[in-house]
Image (tube, rainbow, N blue to C red):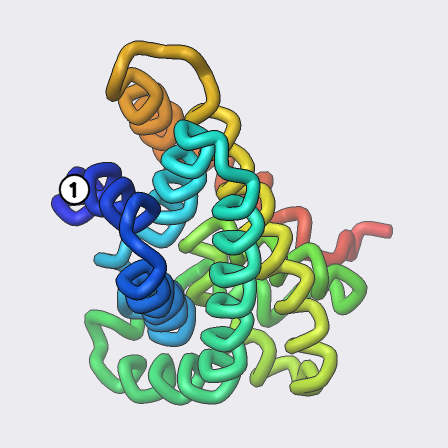
Amino acid sequence: MLLANYLPAWVEHLLNANAEYQLTLYLILFGLIFIETAGIVMGFIPGDTLLIATGSIAGANHSFKDLFLLIIIFGFASLAGDVVNYFFGAWLVRQLSRIKVLDRHLNGPIVQRLQESFHTKRWLLFIVTGRFLPFIRVAVPLMAHRLGLAFVDYIRMAAVASFLWSISLVSLGYFFGKLELPHGINFILLFFVLIIVGVVISRPKVREKIISLFLRDDRK
């Protein structure tokens, strides 16, 4: 959250930099999202906030070029991270599972239910949802390995998820950035929207309904 508080000013410097420095900072943005996606324990990098903030600055500058570049950069960064996460994420979860305290979290009720009753025709929905929701995202590489999802199929679905995530969040930020509001108000609105969404998703009943989307109905 501390990093997120400084994002708007930092991103504004990025998009207003000259071409030489802008290329370097775009590479930094790529690296941040790659690390956030490839390393499932890198929750301190506010990936969603970064996408929305950069989109908002692009919108404030009415720069469609920046909007397009940001979508491409974040989409490919996320996909590259998913390639690593398919192998590294599952391995890391197995190593951390040896620690009893972490094992209760990583192999908790959600993972157990998914492993026992996962609907194999819901892989695309599962991977796309995981790109947007951290509590699902952690389970994606682990479930892919345990249930034998082929790497080619995983990456194809991850590409859809990555670019859908990039397009939707950067475009959302771009829309808010274009609003004619007093300076800083758009970021405050976005902040409260993210807080509300986070509170709603953290509710057990909401999480239960989300998890049920990926499960077989064995009653039929």
At which x and y percent is residue 69?
52, 55
> What's the residue at 48%, 88% (across, down)?
87
Q: Residue furthest left?
A: 2
> What's the residue at 42%, 26% (across, down)?
177
For disc 1, the neighbor class at 10 Å (few under 14, some 14 to 19, many from 20) is few
Figure check: 81 above or below 131 = below
Nearest to the observer: residue 7 or residue 116? 7
Report whether 87 appears left or right of 155: left
Nearest to the observer: residue 130 or residue 63? 63
Which quarter of the rendering shows the N terminus?
A: top left
At which x and y percent is residue 121?
80, 64
Which of the 4 quarters of the picture holds residue 56?
top left
Q: Is residue 149 visible?
A: yes
Nearest to the observer: residue 3 or residue 90? 3
At which x and y percent is residue 130?
53, 57
Report whether 61 appears left or right of 75: left
Figure check: 186 above or below 131 = above
> What's the residue at 52%, 44% (across, down)?
67
Which of the 4 quarters of the picture holds residue 75?
bottom right
Kind of residue at disc 1 = Tyr
Report whether 196 appears left or right of 68: left
> What's the residue at 36%, 11% (across, down)?
181
Nearest to the observer: residue 168 or residue 1? 168
The residue tagged 1 is 6
Q: Is residue 40 visible?
A: no
Q: Secondary structure at mark 1?
A: helix
Figure check: 123 above or below 8 = below
